[in-house]
Image (cartoon, grey):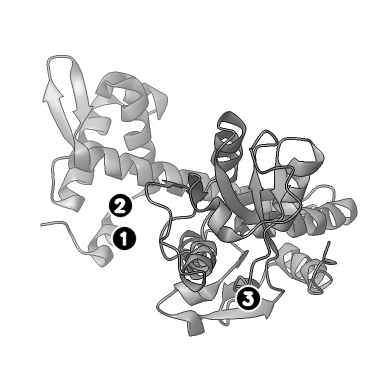
């Protein structure tokens, strides 16, 4: 039985977590002890204390040394996360003491990346010593990172959460969309299209229940068409772009600002299909009642300037 959280908090020490990381890197107790500057008996004692705290064996003892089991690999992964978080804490505190920019962690769904980049550029022009981490992911995953305190804020949608009232939001605007394909697609030069003309082509689509997937499903349903069979499902911008570049018959629905960048570079072509459905607006999202750091407050202000939607092309 895994020990309770209070028991782990009271019994585990940071130096023990450093030993877990060293054991993973060195593979032997002797070398790991040297890396964390303790004696081998001290390392043996510390490892026994770690396993006693969890109530489980984390390493298999073999003739070749110590080998982490599944539980051990899990513990090592979180030990690295804690070590990284402490490094970020130190970095941010040094920045505050020196009057520098500090550190900012922010997330965005794919369609919000262009406006985030514009806002970050203005912020970094004013705060050039600000360290920034940007995470692009789905709304559900970004909200999870906000819940864990790993993001200061995110640009996403709270409707995918079972607790949308757990967040404070700054509404931005609806996400304009484009249907795109490889410039060599057979219908790329067409002046006007209806959805039935594209129904027979293979599609790259977002995973089920994501807002842009729901938009496309509504379009097919309203047109009385069956949703494409055997699509390629991905939430990755890069994967979508590479798939479209590789296969001249694939079709995809993408955020307009993201698509326009690729169209400008000649990587994609816009297909002239009018969409009746609208995508759900996204918002700047933070944990409800959570105080924002100074860099996060500055970014919030910059994002407010983006609240007006981009002009329709």
Query: How busy is the neighbourhood of tag 3: few (under 14 within 10 Å), some, or many (20 plus)?
Result: few
Q: Residue at left 56%, top 71%?
A: 157
Q: Is residue 311 above or below residue 26?
A: below
Expressed as whole percent of the image width and height from the top left, the position of residue 181 reads 64, 43
Task: Provide the residue designation for mark 1.
Answer: 9
Expressed as whole percent of the image width and height from the top left, the position of residue 228 reads 43, 53
Task: Provide the residue designation for mark 2.
Answer: 12
State the CA–CA distance, disc 1 to disc 3.
25 Å
Q: Are marks 2 and 3 in contact (CB under 8 Å)?
A: no
Q: Secondary structure at mark 2?
A: loop
Q: Point out the residue furthest to the bottom here.
A: 165
Q: Is residue 127 above or below residue 189?
A: below
Expressed as whole percent of the image width and height from the top left, the position of residue 172 reads 72, 74
Q: Nearer the viewer, mark 2 or mark 3?
A: 3
Q: Are marks 2 and 1 in contact (CB under 8 Å)?
A: yes
The quadrant the N terminus occupies is: bottom left
State the CA–CA distance, disc 2 to disc 1.
6 Å
State the CA–CA distance, disc 2 to disc 3.
29 Å
Q: Nearer the viewer, residue 220 or 51?
A: 220
The label shown at residue 173 is none
Q: Nearer the viewer, residue 35 or 170?
A: 170
Return the disc, 2 or 3, that comes first in the chain's sequence.
Answer: 2
The quadrant the C terminus occupies is: bottom right
Q: Point out the residue furthest to the top here.
A: 64
Q: Is residue 247 above or below residue 232?
A: above
Q: Nearer the viewer, mark 1 or mark 3?
A: 3
Residue 45 appears in the rendering: yes
């Amino acid at each position: 039985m895994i020990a309770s959280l209070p028991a782990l908090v009271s019994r585990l020490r940071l130096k023990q977590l450093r030993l877990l990381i060293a054991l993973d890197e060195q593979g032997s107790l002797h070398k790991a002890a040297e890396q964390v500057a303790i004696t081998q008996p001290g390392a043996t004692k510390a490892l026994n204390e770690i396993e006693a705290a969890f109530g489980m064996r984390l390493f298999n003892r073999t003739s070749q040394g110590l080998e982490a089991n599944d539980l051990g690999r899990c513990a090592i992964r979180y030990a690295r996360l804690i070590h990284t978080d402490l490094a970020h804490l130190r970095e941010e505190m040094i920045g505050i003491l020196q009057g520098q920019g500090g550190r900012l962690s922010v997330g965005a769904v794919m369609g919000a990346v262009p406006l985030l980049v514009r806002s970050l550029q203005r912020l970094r022009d004013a705060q050039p010593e600000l360290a920034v981490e940007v995470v692009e992911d789905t709304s559900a995953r970004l909200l999870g990172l906000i819940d864990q305190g790993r993001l200061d804020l995110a640009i996403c949608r709270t409707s995918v959460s079972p607790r949308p009232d757990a967040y404070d939001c700054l509404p931005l605007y609806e996400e304009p969309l484009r249907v795109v394909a490889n410039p060599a697609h057979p219908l790329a030069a067409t002046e006007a299209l209806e959805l039935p003309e594209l129904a027979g082509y293979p599609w790259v689509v977002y995973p089920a229940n994501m807002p842009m997937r729901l938009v496309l499903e509504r379009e097919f349903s309203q047109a009385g068409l069956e949703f494409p069979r055997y699509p390629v499902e991905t939430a990755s911008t890069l994967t979508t772009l590479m798939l479209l570049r590789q296969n001249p018959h694939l079709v995809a629905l993408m955020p307009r600002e993201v698509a326009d960048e690729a169209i400008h570079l000649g990587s994609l072509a816009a297909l002239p299909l009018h969409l009746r459905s609208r995508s759900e607006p996204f918002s700047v999202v933070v944990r409800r009642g959570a105080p924002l750091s100074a860099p996060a407050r500055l970014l919030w202000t910059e994002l407010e300037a983006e609240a007006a939607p981009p002009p329709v092309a």
